[in-house]
Amino acid sequence: MALPLAAKDYSPLTPDQQVLLPDPVPFEIDFARDIQPIFEESCVQCHGRGKAKGVFSLETRDDFIFGGDNGEPAEVGRSAESLVIAMISGLKPDIVMPEKGRRLTREEVAIFRAWIDQGMVWPDEINFFEIERSNLHPVDWEDIEVPVEFANPIDGFVDQHFSAIGQEWPGVVDDRTFARRVWLDTIGLLPPPAELEEFLADEAVDKREALVQRLLHDRQAYAEHWLSFWNDLLRNDYRGVGYIDGGRKPITNWLYTALAQNKPYDEFVTELVDPGLAAEGFTKGISWRGAVNASMLPPMQAAQNVAHVFLGVNLKCASCHDSFIDDYTLADAYGLASVYADGPLEVAECDQPTGEMSRVKFLYEEIGELAADSSPEMRRRQLAAIITGRSNGRLPRTIVNRFWQRAFGRGLVEPVDEMDRPAWSPELMDWLAEDLVAHGFDLKHTLERILTSRAYQLPVDRATVAEEEYVFLGPRVRRLSAEQFADAIRAVADLPYPRNASGVNRRAALDDGSAVELPLQPRWIWNSPDAVLGVKPEEVTFRRTVILDQLPVDAAITIAGDNGFTLRINGERVGSNSKRSSSEIKVYDLLPHLRDGANEFEVVGQNFYADGTSVRRLPGQEELPPVTPDTFNPAGVILYTRIRTADTVEDVVSDRTWSFVVAEDEIRPAVELGGLDLAPWRVGHHFLELAAALPDQEPVHRASLVVADPLMVALGRPNREQTTTVRSDEATTLQALELTNGETLARLMTASADRILATAPSSSEQLVRQLYQHALSRPPADRELALAAELLGDTLDSPDVQDLLWALTALPEFQLIY
């Protein structure tokens, strides 16, 4: 029998314990300076902002003096005998406060003692009431007073800010500085020398606005630059934990297409929050192998990711226990996680089951409520509608804040993941957000607003101040991202990357005019009409004979299966996708597999157990788990086979013309389940875009499309196992080593030098001018030209060119965005 827990001793310190206390500090205590920071960091998380653990609140002085379940906390002039000192001193370990987090230092205890002894002076205007969240509610467009003195309203709001702090407008940067800055910020590339010179020679008064518009209109360059930003946010990558066995699913084709086509942001978010097959990897998260903490289960990952990316809220602390850093609770996190669960979740606090079941809820119920009794599919649809709905002002404010941070180096709200904080210009925040909404959630429109503002064109703010003392004076100096650094070196040498590791078909996404016409509509098929709702785990073999009078000149199959498939043609394996919890759209070239006459197509569809267990026995596995209704889940296969001969179209799609094998001597027609928009898969038009596109054989010039190498990792490209909203701008020892003596960079410099020499001008001086224009966006000064030409010598060779490349790329002028 378990022994009862001993009652905690809430008596004051004994005389022997009191002598161990630090003496009160000798100076006069100022509550705002000395006590308020201690309360903010260590106390209000449980006893303020609407919380009163142990019925003890310190929202006001009266609340503090009144005390709670354990009595009065302090008596004026008698600090050593006060209960609060007994608790914060650490001399009574069973009642030490705060229970979690950093303990108070002896100096802080000494300050607290002095405050009590000096009368516990607490100004009436200071309280710890529950704070109204900022940036949460929309503002009617007509209620925003927009300054009219400036062509770009952003500058009107910045002007109000400058006037309030007594700051005159600085002059804007020169054309060359602006061009390099805006090229890198808009499409992530250095300005090509010829285009830069054309811009500099242009005398039009609106040439900066025209340049921004032209860069934003370059759909491929825009998509491939912003792909890195969204890959970080949406934890999407091409290699890493979970990708091999299907515990993690890429969304690259969907994401690249959405960026290339400038999908309106509300639709973009809807398709991620309530996803079809192509975008479901974001909310599916990572299905970790083995036992994991309750806060890392897929539904909780989905809640964390959705809140973090779209609402600017970090729920990781609240996923384990009521947060100590803000007022989000375990109930909040589990309420949102329940949207992505099949049923109610048992709440676990610090990974210990509580026996309580979660209640489905949105974080801000004043904005919208979720129906607890609705299906998981309906809950996701409701959540997407609430997040993108007019009542939620947080969605547009979060994304415009992220864009502002990208352009200026610091957000209107900082940190960018604490969107409950007020912006340094609430009026500018409201206007940017409502302007985005008013223009159909067009993200390029918002970027154009920011990049054409006079504020963006200001010289960089080089002031170094504490965050709490920050005042906007202009953009901050920023470092090239890992991808920008690698791309810049390769652009100088016109050196492409070896391969496209992303798997994205850029021709399909960009709709470059090469797509072929598709005359048919594929259908999802299985062996039962109930497959959409859920059927038993099993393999189902589908077959179809395709007769060709002549060999095709173009043949490819686009196929997806839930959960997987194996494709064979004429008995030869073409491809497969059989991974736990992963259903991907795959494209295979069929030209090597087809022949004149009859061609036998066979697709073995695989429906896994509901928990992701394969229907095939693994090595060492004696038998499969029993099949029960709990193991049922949706199943289906869909495909489009594009076959073109010189004269005919011989396309084949999945439909009832296929047969499935019941037994060795029995076949039946496949059962059609529905078309491209059938839930839960909803592959939609994206499936046909991939089916219609010719193979992507274009060279790769962007690091966003390749796997991170050691250089990019050292420069801060994350592994994307979690959402990353801002990369660190701090230089590290690893970066210094990689940039001065790294093997990856050395190989890149060698390859770049060899490439440059293949087309280099014969004169050393000409090559120096060429490299300076490419790398630094300016000609060399006379002294630089002489020194660099002397380094290269009269006979150009690879080691000397490498030395010059190392020297140029080591310059702050190359590595920083001014």
Image: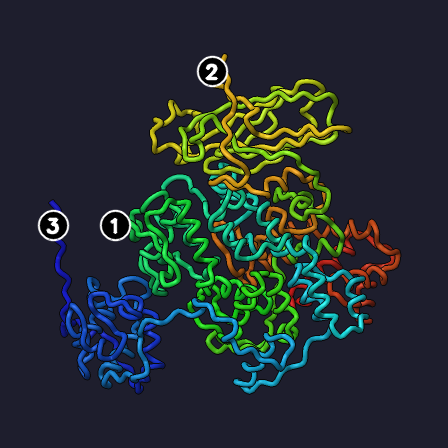
> In front: mark 1 or mark 3?
1
Residue furthest to the top = 665
Rendered-image quadrant of the C terminus:
bottom right
Q: Is residue 461 visible?
A: no
- Relative image position of residue 218 (x, y in whole percent): 70, 57
Please identify the quarter of the rendering in which residue 515 is found: top right
* Residue picked out by circle 3: 3
| Marks 1/3: CA–CA distance | 25 Å
Residue 46 on image: x %, y %: 28, 66
Whether label 2 touches label 1, CB < 8 Å: no
Q: Is residue 487 above or below residue 209?
A: above
- The three-letter amino acid code for the residue at tag 3 is Leu
Q: Foreground: 695 or 809? A: 695
Counting residues from the N terminus, which is met first, the one under dot 1 or under dot 3? 3
Above or below residue 79? Residue 686 is: above
Determine whether, in the image, residue 330 is placed left or right of residue 282: left
Q: Nearer the viewer, mark 2 or mark 1?
A: 2
Which residue corresponds to mark 1?
356
Residue that appears at 19% across and 62% down:
94
Amino acid on which the number 2 mark rests in the picture: Ala
Q: Amino acid at mark 1?
A: Glu
Q: Give the residue number, with chain letter if any, for mark 2.
A: 663
Q: Are marks 1 and 3 in contact (CB under 8 Å)?
A: no
**Horizontally, is 163 left or right of 552 in the view?**
left
Residue depicted at 37% across the width and 71% down the height: 132
Between the residue at mark 2 and the residue at mark 3, the CA separation in whole angstroms equals 63 Å
Q: Residues within 10 Å of mark 3 (few under 14, many from 20)?
A: few
Can the viewer see residue 393?
yes
Secondary structure beneath label 2: strand
